Image: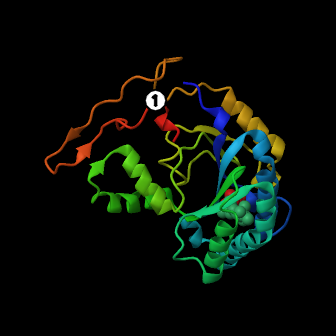
Amino acid sequence: MANREGEGLHVAIIMDGNGRWAQARGLPRVAGHRAGAEAVRHIVHAAPAANIRTLSLYSFSADNWQRPQAEVDTIMRLLHEYLLTEVNRCIAHGVRLSVIGRRDRLSRMLREAIESAEAATAAAHTLHLRLAVDYSAREAIFRAACRFYKATELSRDSFARVLGEVNHDGAANVDLLIRTGGERRLSDFLLWESAYAELVFTERMWPEFTAEDLAAAVQEYRSRERRFGRAPQAVAGESPKPGYRNSNSKKIYFGLSPRSGAAANRP
Ligand code: FPP
């Protein structure tokens, strides 16, 4: 099935390899995170030219709290610094900045910086930059499920809407998921949203990931045929499966809900 590239891609990146990059240079791990923050600046700048409309960056996972306190503090400081220093550049380049993940465990200072960066860039529309901070896909899905059981219409679309609320920022499908640093796993990042994402793994450590690497990953994505479970080159547009009502009068859909067309994989 053809993707709708005209609208721009949603690319998610697991920015891995900061620590190893630093260690290979005899530097402390935190130097790798500092270099990683610089790489974020370059990649955000390069994203629109690579036809990226939404860029989700895994900046701090819920499991990262288990790292040494000094390392956690450094990453939090870098995030705070990024939010403060990049707002004007974001506004100038049309970058809307938002943060997904839990906020209740972040410092008040960081929460305020997030809220103020989100408010200041809300009108921008060239690129949507989403930083995942204290993020866990499993936890987001679990929390959405806890809210969802009260819903009257049980469809994938309505679940995705609840998940989007839990995320603070929607649950748009990911087209391309890139992981740097040589590992090949998803590490609890955007599991629902990446159901049909193309995966690109690169040996490159995050601090040395360049605009050219990003363009090459997008090129690799373009070379793949996205079928969403259909036969090769199937014609899109067939009718979704009908729903039924269960004994609690909740409407349940097995496949796509009636509102969903063939393009529903890419809301
Ligand atoms: C994974 O590398 C990276 C992180 C856990 C943190 C990512 C943080 C940044 C890129 C900097 C701050 C972010 C922004 C948006 C300003 P790792 O430390 O696990 O690397 P390793 O696998 O080599 O140990």
In percent of width and height, residue 120 lies at: 69, 68
- Identified by mark 1, the residue type is Ala
Q: Is residue 81 above or below residue 45?
A: below
From this viewpoint, which residue is outermost toward the left?
A: 247
Residue shown at 46% from the left, 62% from the top: 166
State which image quarter holds ligand 1: bottom right
Residue shown at 65% from the left, 62% from the top: 122
Residue shown at 33% from the left, 57% from the top: 148
- Please indicate, yes or no, whether residue 36 appears anywhere in the rendered image: no
Tell me if 13 is positioned left or right of 88 in this view. Answer: left
- Please indicate, yes or no, whether residue 195 appears anywhere in the rendered image: yes
In percent of width and height, residue 22 lies at: 80, 62
In percent of width and height, residue 76 lies at: 68, 74
Ligand 1 within 8 angstroms of badge 1 C-beta: no
Q: Quadrant of the image for the N terminus?
A: top right
Nearest the camera: 24 or 151?
Answer: 151
**Crowdedness of circle 1 by 10 Å Cα count: few (<14), some, many (20+)?**
some
Q: Is residue 92 above or below residue 126?
A: below
Q: Is residue 33 above or below residue 175?
A: below
The quadrant holding residue 33 is bottom right
The quadrant holding residue 3 is top right
Q: Which residue is mark 1?
A: 262
In percent of width and height, residue 193 lies at: 51, 47
| Total numbered labels | 1
Q: Give the colour scheme shown.
A: rainbow
Q: Secondary structure at mark 1?
A: helix
